[in-house]
Image (cartoon, rainbow, N blue to C red):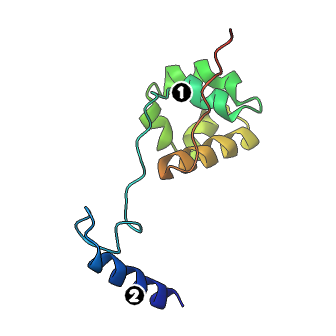
């Protein structure tokens, strides 16, 4: 079924010109889009919520960079004294952020 759909889509793509270099595979292998907003450690932890934002100062002093937080392992977070449930939340959301499936919501402007 999936092969039939793929073949049908590539036939229609071959008939109509597309701006992609390899027709049919652009949808499957595209990179996740970059976000316009700059996300730092405080915005990331506030986006998670559930008490994780209490560790902002600790993570900023020990880890420092948001990109380093995205690749931090659980043992490093454990050595910093972050409880298990909050470590799991940080690691789960960091993985989703790297894949482009989740991002912290922007705070609404108060008028």
**Residue placed under numbered mark 1 in the picture:** 41
In-image side of 99 versus 48 (left or right): left
Q: Is residue 79 above or below residue 18?
A: above
In-image side of 68 versus 11 (left or right): right
Residue under the image location 70 percent in, 30 percent down: 52
**Residue placed under numbered mark 2 in the picture:** 7
Q: Which of the two discs, 1 and 2, labels the residue nearer the N terminus?
A: 2
Q: Quadrant of the C terminus?
A: top right
Q: Is residue 94 above or below residue 39?
A: below
Furthest-front residue in view? 16
Residue 21, position as x, y percentages in the image: 22, 66
In-image side of 41 versus 20 (left or right): right
Nearest to the observer: residue 19 or residue 71: 19
Name the image quarter holding residue 94. top right
Residue 18, position as x, y percentages in the image: 27, 66
Question: How many C-alpha atoms fall within 10 Å of the one at disc 2: few (<14), some, or many (≥20)?
Answer: few
In-image side of 84 versus 57 (left or right): right
Nearest to the observer: residue 43 or residue 89: 43
Furthest-top residue in view? 111
Nearest to the observer: residue 96 or residue 80: 96
Q: Are marks 1 and 2 in contact (CB under 8 Å)?
A: no
The circle drawn on residue 14 is none
Residue 85, position as x, y percentages in the image: 75, 43
Q: Is residue 53 above or below residue 83?
A: above
Residue under the image location 65 percent in, 24 percent down: 55
Helix, strand or loop status at disc 1: helix
Whole-angstrom CA distance, mark 1 to mark 2, is: 44 Å
Name the image quarter holding residue 42. top right
Helix, strand or loop status at disc 2: helix
Residue 34, position as x, y percentages in the image: 40, 41
Name the image quarter holding residue 16. bottom left
């Amino acid at each position: 079924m999936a092969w039939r759909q793929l073949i049908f889509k590539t036939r229609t793509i071959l008939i109509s010109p597309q701006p992609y270099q390899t027709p049919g595979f652009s949808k499957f292998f595209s990179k996740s889009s970059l976000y316009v907003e700059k996300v730092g450690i405080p915005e990331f932890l506030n986006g998670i919520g559930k008490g994780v934002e209490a560790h902002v100062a600790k993570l900023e002093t020990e880890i420092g960079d948001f990109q380093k937080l995205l690749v931090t392992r659980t043992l490093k977070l454990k050595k910093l004294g972050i409880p298990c449930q909050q470590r799991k939340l940080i690691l789960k959301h960091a993985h989703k952020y790297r894949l482009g499936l989740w991002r912290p919501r922007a705070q609404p402007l108060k008028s």
